[in-house]
Image (cartoon, helix red, strand yellow):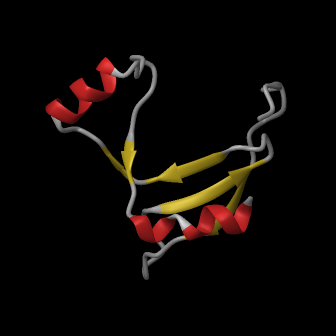
Amino acid sequence: MSTDHDEPLSLVFLGTPSAGGNCPTAYATNRGTFVVQGSKVTDPAALAQLRERGLPDHETAVEIPASLLPYFTEGA
């Protein structure tokens, strides 16, 4: 994964299983990474688990359906 963040992040649409084009959506970036659009995890118990595993305060988690996963292999 590239660590050069001087270049602005650009997104390439990979796909979505949503008929209306809304979330969830997968994107590839010019940094060799992926960006996902999904529902923000807000459940307190789930967030506590994530924090215990090291999720820092400046990060968040999103929930995506398994039907979004094939778009990542297509974009890799």
The residue nearer to you, when weighing 60 against 74, is 74
The residue drawn where x is 78% and y is 26% is 5
Q: Is residue 26 above or below residue 43?
A: below
- Residue 15 percent location from the top left of the image: 59, 71
* Number of numbered discs overlaid on the protein picture: 0
Q: Is residue 39 left or right of residue 33?
A: left
Q: Residue furthest bottom?
A: 19
In which quadrant is the N terminus drawn?
top right
Residue 22 visible within the image: no
Q: Is residue 30 visible?
A: yes
17 with respect to 42 (left or right):
right
Q: Quadrant of residue 40?
A: top left
Instruction: Locate residue 76, reporting x and y percent.
Output: 74, 58
Give the residue drawn at x 63%, y 61%: 72
Taking the view exactly as shown, the residue that stands out farthest to the front is: 53
Q: Quadrant of residue 61?
A: top left
Residue displayed at 39% across by 57% down: 64
Residue 11, x across and y down, in percent: 71, 52
In the rendered image, which quarter is residue 67 located in?
bottom left
Q: Nearer the viewer, residue 30 or 8?
A: 30
Q: Position of residue 58 (x, y in %)?
A: 45, 19
Name which residue lies at 83% across and 26% down. 4
